Amino acid sequence: MSETSRRELIRIAEDMNETSNDETRQFISRIVGDLSGLKPSIAFVGQIKAGKSRLINGFTGQAEYLPSDVNPWTTVITDMHFGHPSGRTEGAEFHFFDNHQWQALIAEGEELRNMFPDEEDSYKREMIEEQVEAMKTRARLRLGDSYEQLLGQHHDLEDLNSDDLARYVCAGDDPSDSETHDPGSDRGLYSDITRKAEVYFDIGHFPFPLTVTDTPGVNDPLLIREEISRQYLKESDFFVVVLSAHQALSRADLKLFRLMQALELGQIVVFINRVDELGGGAEDAGKVRSDVLDGLEQALGNSDIDVLMGSAQWAHYALTGDETGVNHDDVLAWLRAHPEQMKQYLDGVEEIKQGPGPISREGVLRFAAMIASGLPDLRRHVTQALADGPRSEQLRMAWQHLNSFAQGELERSQAELRALESEDGSATVDLDENNKTLGELRALVAEKTEVMTRDMDDVLANLRGVMDDTVAEAVSAVVRGPDGNSPLLAKGAETELNFTPLRDRMRELIQGATQVVRQRMLSELYAIDMQANAALRALPGWQDPVDNRMNTSAVRWFRPDTTALTRGITVELRVNWLSRLISRKSVVTRAERMIVQEFELIGDDLIDTARENMMERLKTVLDHYVALLGGYLEHRTGSGETNAQAEAQDAFDRARRIADELETVFGPVRADEGQAKAAE
């Protein structure tokens, strides 16, 4: 669905809210809020000096907006909001660290490092702590007495220029270095305490609102920058991993990919930048791309990550006219080697020729450079993936709920109009009977909710016991080793214990238990649906709506979040400290106890998260259904009998209009949706 469809759904929902009952209005307001805030995010990640900032400038069309010199950034995540739900299109907000957030940064980083450790990780925490203290010291020197007052605060600038940006996100001179520091410069004034920058733009050339995020580079000598980037990974919906054509898929790159895979993140695309700097042009670039694909396959298994290529430098020239470092023969050679891009270029030139103004050589060259840069292809790839992914599913679900309300209102108003038109009035709606029925149905829903909750808690309580037994048995087998020969007592500087089978078994257990809960919930929801429909049909003059089935999609498609299983177990990765213990037996016993405790905590997190998510989905299904029933049963009439029929006709006409508008947005209920309903 397009951005136009999203806006139209919001308009229709707000229109429906004007005459809805309280329960329906509450639910529709939630839909409006979800649709208004639907703003996927794209994070650009990768090593330092891979050209991320200049690439983002080309991707967003904001030439030279983000500084792209060798080392402009400090510990700053920069979110560029295009078409923000608030309606804001200019200015920026800068959020400052507080002491708690600095400490959380250190603690959370330790957890991520433990997932895929290397020989350098043993001293990284100490270095990061030192760097955080150095940041605080620099900030105190720069800010003086205002330092303490600024912690945890934020600055909101209505307008923003490059000098403003430099004050908050660029490193600047070290104020403790008298030889290099310029006391008159405010570059980097707030950079050491700036946690995050949010910059606002209009929607630009994107098809729907989104956020583009520039992250500090991984493999940065200043480890705190790398830590910021790694910890931000869970915050985005889509990732562009930027590789340099000169050193594509290095050890640091592979470690980043493994971490992203372990965290079960969203969609990923790889962009190999700086192909313009390869001596062999398209031929060398093709070899680099092939090597990257092979490397990803070997490192990640059945990887389906797309790999695109291009040049941020060419895009920079296309946007600014700055020809520095641009060889036009190389640009044209690249287009000739890539027929699809050549076709885009030729079609675009023909379109330019049809325009009102004269066509210039420079304009054609800059257009060629933009196509060859690969940025238009990257933009299409990312926005299409987002449109076809979670964004599309959210819009579809919103439409289904709104359509249920609309069809219910249409049927109700039609029945009311039919009753008023009857000569003997025998079909007149009994308001007291309707209210009584609605109250009984609400009580039924509350009763069944308690039953489903108790049943779920019983299943999950049993799962906790099974999970603990599984953990204890598996950890003991690994730590104590075959025939009682513990690998912890083997010679060598360090020992790695393999708990992958245990993690896989824990994943199977949580998936199996939640499947049982899900099926039992669906059975109870089906029972509610049947009893409610029977109660409605018993009402005098009741006529079934076209579609009054409960929408159980939120429960039916539930899958447990298993992110907790990617958490590292410190003892399983590093056991050098064990050598300091005296008793060999106590070494094994203590290690076993510690590892069991950590895996039990992981199991608790799995179960608690699953329960919370399932309850939220169950509430969504039942809130929607109760609101739908309220819409069916509520009887609204005018203040006088003489105009009751006219008002009923108006209500029917309005309901018909809204139903037709919804059908125009999404079309009639499709076959796959019908099959999904039948599957319930």
Image (cartoon, rainbow, N blue to C red):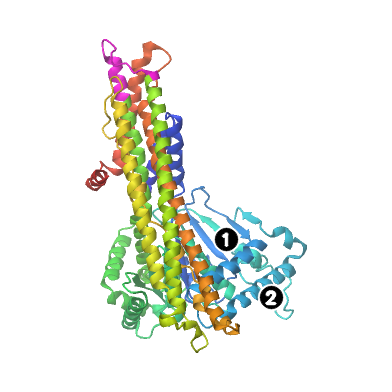
Q: Is residue 547 above or below residue 260?
A: above
Q: Amino acid at mark 1?
A: Ala
Q: Is residue 421 magenta?
A: yes
Among numbered discs 2 and 1, the one appearing first in the sequence: 2
* Residue 679, position as x, y percentages in the image: 25, 46
Q: Amino acid at mark 2?
A: Asp
**Residue annotated with mark 1:** 197
* Residue 605, position as x, y percentages in the image: 48, 59
Foreground residue, 45 or 580? 580
Q: Left or right: where does residue 19 sit relative to residue 189?
A: left
Q: Secondary structure at mark 2?
A: loop
Q: Is residue 392 above or below residue 534?
A: below
Foreground residue, 288 or 360? 288
Q: Residue at x 56, y 78 (%)?
A: 586
Q: Quadrant of residue 141?
A: bottom right
Mark number, residue 174: 2
**Span of residues in magenta:** 413-432
* Residue 530, position as x, y percentages in the image: 29, 34
Q: Quadrant of residue 167?
A: bottom right
